[in-house]
């Protein structure tokens, strides 16, 4: 895949980036280099390779999926300007 100056200008316009003709010419070469690298990655045989998120085998930490009140409502409302019975108090905004 190859990118020309018109494509660079169109992408810059879509991204709301102001690009001069000189910059567009330079970006054309840079984008073509990036796309060539991506095409090179397509050639790698990944058949049988298991997807992974890290090079080190890790188990995800899991917790019980239960609803709780957190157990510390006084800490939650502690910095509130006003609270009553562990509920936030706010001024009335609708008349």
Image (spheres, helix red, strand yellow):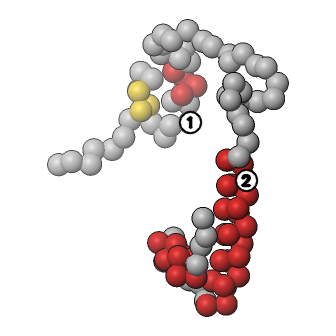
Residue count near mark 2 (Cα–Cα under 10 Å), binned few <14, some 14–19, many ≥20: few
Quadrant location, the N terminus: bottom right
Image point 55% across, 9% down: which residue?
64
Q: Position of residue 84 (x, y in %)?
A: 41, 26
Nearer to us in this view, 2 or 68: 2
Q: Position of residue 78 (x, y in %)?
A: 56, 30
Residue 83 lies left or right of residue 41; in this view the side is: left
| Label 2 element class | helix
Residue identifier under label 2: 40
Q: Height in image: 1 above or below 23?
A: above
Q: Earlier in the sequence, mark 2 or mark 1?
A: 2
Q: Residue at the far right: name it.
A: 56
Nearer to us in this view, 64 or 92: 64
Work out how far the residue at label 2 is from the one at label 1, CA to CA, in angstroms.
55 Å
Q: Height in image: 27 above or below 53?
A: below
Residue 85 lies left or right of residue 34; in this view the side is: left
Image point 54% across, 22% down: which residue?
74
Q: Taking the image as drawn, is residue 10 in sight?
A: yes
Residue identifier under label 1: 79
Q: Which circle marks residue 35 in the picture?
A: none
Image point 68% across, 18% down: which residue?
60
Res. 28 image quadrant: bottom right
Residue count near mark 1 (Cα–Cα under 10 Å), binned few <14, some 14–19, many ≥20: few
């Amino acid at each position: 895949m190859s990118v020309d100056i018109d494509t660079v200008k169109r992408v810059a316009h879509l991204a709301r980036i102001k690009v001069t003709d000189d910059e567009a010419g330079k970006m054309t070469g840079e984008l073509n280099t990036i796309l060539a690298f991506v095409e090179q990655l397509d050639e790698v045989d990944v058949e049988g390779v298991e997807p992974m998120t890290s090079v080190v085998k890790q188990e995800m930490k899991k917790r019980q999926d239960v609803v709780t009140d957190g157990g510390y409502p006084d800490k939650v409302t502690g910095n509130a300007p006003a609270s009553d019975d562990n509920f936030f108090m706010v001024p009335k905004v609708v008349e």
